[in-house]
Image (tube, helix red, strand yellow):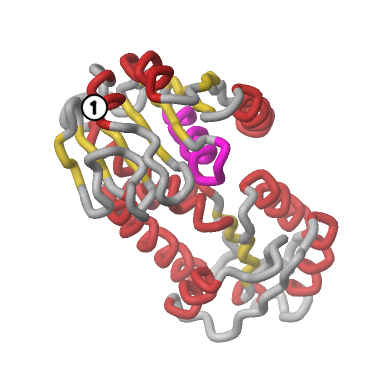
Amino acid sequence: MITPLKHTSPFDVNMAVDAGFHIISANVEVGLQDVAPLTQDAMFSRSPDAAKRTVLFIGGKDASLALDQMKAAGAALFAPFEISIFADPAGSFTTAAAMIALVEKKLAATRPEGLKGAKVQVYGATGIVGGIAAVIAAQAGAEVTIVSHRVIEDVEVKAIDFKKRFGVILNCAVATNDEEKKALVPDAEVILTAASAGVEVISTEVLKAATSLLVAADINAVPPTGIAGVGANDDGVPLPHGVGVGALVIGQVKYQVQHQILKRIRASDTALRIGFLEAYELARKIAA
């Protein structure tokens, strides 16, 4: 495991142990320049036939850096010495994948075309989960707006970065209070909240103004939750408009996605590379 942070995530360590990995090496404060030599040090430690038993897990709390580290690790590999790579910084890739998969499932009842063409607003998009959720939704064909609660430049930086990386177009908006949110939400068919724990982003009054809303999903399990009326265990709770999905429902799918990916890597006869797109494909199957 590598992370640019001071500590390796105990969550990820436990997930690896529960998936059957016996030896876990924690490498902390790993910069981008350190990734290639660490990757090659790991891959040369076993014969080509046994290299598949080694996995590089990329953690941290920065999605863009994790993607850069994943790219650097992949570039350092060459046949026949190849190891698996799995990036999931702060659980964000698997969480975002689970969030969008569950939104799609709920949309099926009222919008058979799913996310294609749907108007999606993401609050907390400057965070690690919200940004990746926005990208996944956009790649699924949604018209996505990422919303800042401070200044629009915060989300414009994200939009530029994600367009460069993935070719997606993300609209940008700012809403610093309920009145500004009430002016923004009437067009939203999907609302995603991925703000800090214990912060209500979408109030009851804002929900009442969201007259086109079909599904709202929140990843905050700490009271108060991110969306008024959506508890952590809610799975399709009725809202003034549409239905809501809570954090622990998303978390249950996220857990299964990460667990199954780790087990798949451990059992694979070939080296695998797993990012948020692969996580999303699996999340859709689990959520179905």
88 relative to 246, above or below = below
Q: Position of residue 262 (x, y in %)?
A: 48, 68
**260 displayed left or right of 38:** left
- Residue at image mark 1: 214
The image quarter containing residue 117 is: top left
Q: Position of residue 164 (x, y in %)?
A: 68, 28
Q: Nearer the viewer, residue 6 or 76?
A: 6
| Amino acid found under the numbered disc labelled 1 | Leu
The question of residue 128 being in magenta is answered with yes
Q: Position of residue 244 (x, y in %)?
A: 24, 39
The quadrant in which the N terminus is found is: bottom right
288 relative to 138, above or below = below
Q: Name the residue at 64% across, 49% down.
A: 62
Magenta stretch bounds: 126-140
The question of residue 191 being in magenta is answered with no
Q: Name the residue at 84% across, 66% down.
A: 37
Secondary structure beneath dot 1 equals loop
Q: Name the residue at 48% across, 33% down.
A: 134
**4 displayed left or right of 243:** right
- By secondary structure, the bulk of the magenta-drawn segment is best described as helix
**119 displayed left or right of 111:** right
Q: Nearer the viewer, residue 252 or 172?
A: 172
Q: Name the residue at 44% across, 45% down.
A: 96
